[in-house]
Image (cartoon, grey):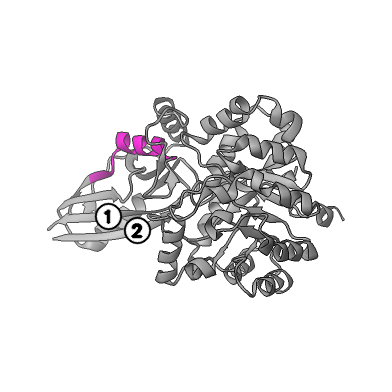
């Protein structure tokens, strides 16, 4: 049995990195997390045990040039991983418009040992195929690190969805076939574009961190067995979808419960809940060898 | 005279009954109030304060009965995106179970002692866990 890995967690309210009230206000404003509050890592541990989840992938977001700050810094991610290495994997982020973007990534991958990169084309205002991104992609290839891209709808009022339509990532997938990338949120509402991308390109994955509008059970049943065909995931996409919750917006346990309620084959569920993430994160070789 | 205490606890499951009777008994004694009442009040809208017998079989029956009345998956209007939270309401069952079970319990105090029936225990009831939770014990009297 693979580990169960939640690929999509924003640690904006972890007490150990939330002592500055101005920082908390910034995170709330940028992410639309208005009424949420801080909590200790012990609660996260308890919630993971309740959910049956082994690891959370923590995602920061660098908004330096547009908003003058980060929604959790790379250093804060490292701090959380050091506090609870049994619970967390850490990703980096970089604002592609920073002049020192390459140096930031060198530091994040070489010194902070972060496992991948989180980018949000809508929030950071870039098209994935923009030439300014080439230095970022090459740096990820240099360190063999995957990218998790925000894809699909953005709730925030100050960012446009057009930057993150799944087909905007196609030329990147073609030009960088060795670069593992994940289209977060399954690119909702463009789920057919996402299905085509993960079907066609071996290096493209998607996560399940969708903004449900009823319950996880009802929403995933609609998306994965009615809007997409009943056997599409089992027969074609099972190797490319990863469990992601978008915690704290949505609880890890509830998203997992929704996925587990779908009538998929057991091996499909195992891949989605963790097996595919092991491949994406390049953990298979480390665990097997 | 009124004396109040705020207590914290971390719940471990979505549904959980946690006895808080010892804390209530202790605070009644500590308050020094000889005759009056003690209130135990939850600070949340998806939890309750419940009085019942402390038997595991009753835990099972209470959970199963509430689940039967208020199923986890149902067409709840609350299950929509809430801009004020930046999240979809996923805890309508917790709100409804809280409504059914109530937010507080109250007991008489006589000669400095809480007056409980032999089978009565006092529970913090979690319907939306695991979470950090708070509840109040307030003693009123003389």
Image check: A105 left or right of A23?
right
Tell me if residue B94 is in the magenta stretch. yes
- Stretch in magenta: B90-106
Quadrant housing residue A90: bottom right
Q: Position of residue A184 (x, y in %)?
A: 61, 47
Residue pushed farthest right? A289
Name the chain letter of the residue that bears numbered label 1: B
Visible in this render: residue A16? no
| Residue at 61% in and 42% down | A186
Q: Which of the pair A284/A242 is nearer the observer?
A: A242
Q: Are marks 2 and 1 in contact (CB under 8 Å)?
A: yes
Residues at marks 2 and 1, CA–CA distance in whole angstroms:
8 Å
| Label 1 element class | strand
Q: On residue B7, which mark appears?
A: 2
Q: Which residue is mark 1?
A: B137
Image check: B51 left or right of B138?
right
Visible in this render: residue B134? yes
Residue pushed farthest front? A131
| Residue at 64% in and 34% down | A192
Quadrant housing residue B136: bottom left
Q: Mark 2 vs mark 1: which is more N-terminal? A: 2
């Amino acid at each position: 049995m693979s580990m169960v890995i939640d690929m999509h967690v924003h640690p904006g309210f972890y007490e150990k990195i939330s002592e500055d009230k101005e920082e908390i206000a910034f995170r709330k404003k940028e992410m639309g997390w208005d009424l949420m509050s801080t909590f200790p890592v012990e609660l996260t541990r308890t919630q993971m045990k309740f959910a049956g989840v082994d690891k959370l992938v923590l995602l920061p977001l660098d908004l330096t040039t547009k908003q003058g700050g980060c929604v959790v810094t790379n250093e804060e991610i490292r701090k959380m991983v050091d506090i609870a290495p049994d619970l967390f994997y850490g990703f980096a982020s970089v604002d592609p418009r920073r002049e020192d973007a390459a140096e930031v990534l060198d530091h994040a991958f070489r010194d902070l040992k972060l496992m991948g990169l989180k980018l949000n084309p809508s929030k950071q205002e870039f098209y994935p195929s923009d030439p300014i991104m080439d230095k970022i992609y090459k740096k990820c290839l240099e360190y063999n690190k995957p990218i998790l891209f925000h894809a699909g709808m953005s709730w925030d009022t100050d960012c446009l969805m057009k930057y993150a339509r799944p087909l905007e990532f196609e030329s990147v997938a073609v030009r960088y076939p060795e670069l593992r990338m994940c289209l977060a949120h399954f690119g909702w509402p463009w789920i057919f574009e996402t299905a085509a991308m993960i079907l066609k390109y071996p290096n493209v994955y998607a996560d399940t961190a969708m903004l449900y509008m009823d319950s996880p059970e009802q929403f995933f049943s609609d998306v994965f067995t009615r809007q997409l065909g009943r056997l599409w995931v089992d027969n074609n996409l099972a190797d490319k979808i990863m469990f992601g919750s978008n915690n704290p917006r949505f609880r890890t346990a509830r998203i997992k419960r929704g996925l587990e309620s779908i009538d998929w084959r057991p091996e499909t569920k195992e891949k989605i809940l963790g097996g595919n993430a092991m491949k994406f994160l390049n953990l298979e070789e480390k665990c097997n060898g | 005279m009124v004396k109040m205490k705020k207590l914290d606890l971390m719940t471990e499951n979505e549904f959980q009954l946690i006895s808080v009777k010892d804390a209530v008994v202790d605070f009644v004694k500590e308050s020094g109030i000889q005759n009056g009442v003690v209130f135990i009040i939850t600070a949340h809208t998806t939890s309750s304060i419940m009085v019942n017998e402390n038997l595991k079989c009753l835990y099972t029956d209470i959970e199963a009965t509430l689940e039967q009345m208020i199923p986890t998956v149902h067409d709840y209007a609350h299950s929509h995106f809430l801009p004020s939270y930046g999240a979809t309401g996923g805890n309508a069952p917790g709100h409804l179970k809280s409504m059914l079970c109530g937010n507080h319990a109250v007991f008489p105090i006589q000669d400095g002692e809480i007056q409980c029936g032999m089978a009565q225990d006092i529970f913090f009831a979690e319907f939306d866990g695991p979470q950090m939770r708070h509840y109040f014990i307030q003693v009123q009297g003389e």
